[in-house]
Image (cartoon, grey):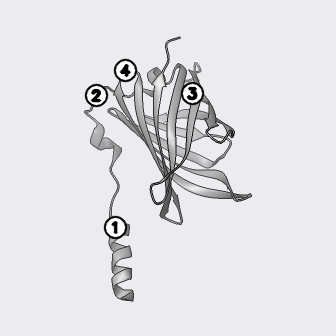
Amino acid sequence: MRALFLSLLLTLGACSSTDVQEYKGNEPTLTLEEFFQGSLTAHGVLKNRGGKVTRYFNATIEASWDNSGVGYLAERFEFNDGEIQHRNWRLEPTGEGRYRATAGDVVGPGEAVVSGNAMKMNYVLEVDYKDRKLEVSVEDWMWRVDDDTIINQSILRKWGFRVGTIQLTIIRQDD
């Protein structure tokens, strides 16, 4: 039985995730500097590791880019239990379709890669959990589905195991 369990773990560990380059030819093209400009809203759910929705949220995002090409996303999340969270992202271009992503509750820099209509971003997020701080790895995917809409899925892991997911829709607002 133990050998079967170890074999299963090795097989699961060998599975590769999707490469963002697989979306290279997909339309509409996701250009961060164009999509994340001005006011946006986000609406989503948090799910536990079993897939049960545990929280709902709505968010506002104010996005801008400076003359050096650095992007800023000021996010305000309001959860169904009344909690309010803020996250301020800084997206610094590091090469063709690549960005260094930082925020106050992100441990170290994250990396974002854009290709076609998709973006994949990996980072470590510090979250409050049962009166203590916990670091979780986040695999964050975005797909632009039309001029004004992105579908986003984030997979949260601790010690390599999935502990939850976040699913949301980001919508550009007319200014």
Task: Tell me how far mark 1 sits from mark 3, CA to CA.
Answer: 36 Å
Task: Tell me how far mark 4 sits from mark 3, CA to CA.
Answer: 22 Å
Left or right: where 158 falls relative to 7: right
Mark 3 vs 2, N-terminal side: 2
In this view, the mark in front (3 or 2) = 2
Horizontal and vertical percent for residue 29? 33, 27
Tell which of 8 and 14 is nearer to you.
8
Mark 1 vs 3, N-terminal side: 1
Task: Tell me how far mark 4 sits from mark 2, CA to CA.
Answer: 10 Å
Tell which of 77 and 8 is nearer to you.
77
Extreme right residue here?
A: 131
Amino acid type at image mark 3: Val
Specify the quadrant that holds the N terminus: bottom left
Q: Which residue corresponds to mark 1?
A: 14
Residue displayed at 37% across by 20% down: 147
Mark 4 vs 3, N-terminal side: 3
Horizontal and vertical percent for residue 12? 35, 68
Q: Which residue corresponds to mark 2?
A: 27
Residue displayed at 41% across by 31% down: 150
Q: Which residue corresponds to mark 3?
A: 70
Amino acid type at image mark 2: Glu
Task: Tell me how far mark 1 sits from mark 4, CA to CA.
Answer: 36 Å
Mark 4 vs 2, N-terminal side: 2
Q: Determine whether the residue tagged by mark 4 lies in a helix, strand or loop.
A: loop
Q: Is residue 105 something that shows in the picture?
A: yes
Q: Which residue corresponds to mark 4?
A: 147
